Image (tube, rainbow, N blue to C red):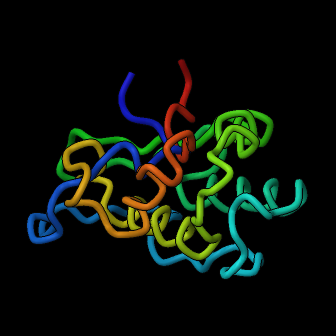
Amino acid sequence: MGPSPLAIAAVGVLVLAVAGGCESSGPGAGASGPDVDPSKRMLAVSPEEEAFLCNWLAGEWGGYGGALRCEAGGEILAAPLSQPHCLMVLDLPRWTRSCPLTVGQFESCIDWQAQNVCLVGIVSGPMLPAECQLELGPACSNSTGAVDAGAD
């Protein structure tokens, strides 16, 4: 069982300079974000918006039950199995109430992961994009982001 989607920021990713030969392909690369106000805090999204974000995230990562694979081999970014599974894994009610992560920052982190599949699970902490670092930082420490969205 490898790294999974929803707490993505926690999964870590390699240095961008190394990304040269590790481009990913599939639905995630270059897709536009969901129709949710990007300045809205993740903790302020409605249940309908949360479901929309799950649908968007799954589409970015190959569709429900799908996956993006590193063309160079190794890393796999698994999408949630279904919308209920995504909502369960995202689990916004468990996030730290002070988490300032916005929808736009969440989208940026998801996009980065989809475009850098080869790096997901390799680098962590300060090597991650700022948006992903925020999700994993102390202000959002209870967030699960994209972690464990794949099959067990």
- State left or right for residue 65 relative to residue 22: right
Give x and y (percent) for residue 115: 36, 66
Residue pictured at 44% horizontal, 49% vertical: 138
Give x and y (percent) for residue 65: 62, 37
Query: Which is nearer the eye, 68 or 152?
Result: 152
Give x and y (percent) for residue 120: 30, 49
Q: Is residue 10 above or below residue 107?
A: above
Query: Which is nearer the eye, 105 or 27?
Result: 105
How many numbered tags mark residues here? 0
Give x and y (percent) for residue 61: 52, 54
Residue pictured at 17% horizontal, 51% vertical: 72
Residue pictured at 71% horizontal, 39% vertical: 91
**For residue 100, what is the image quadrant?**
bottom right
Residue pictured at 35% horizontal, 47% vertical: 69
- State left or right for residue 7 relative to residue 83: left
Q: Is residue 11 above or below residue 22?
A: above
The quadrant of the image that shows the N terminus is: top left
- State left or right for residue 110 relative to residue 97: left
- State left or right for residue 114 relative to residue 66: left
- The residue sitting at the top extreme is 152
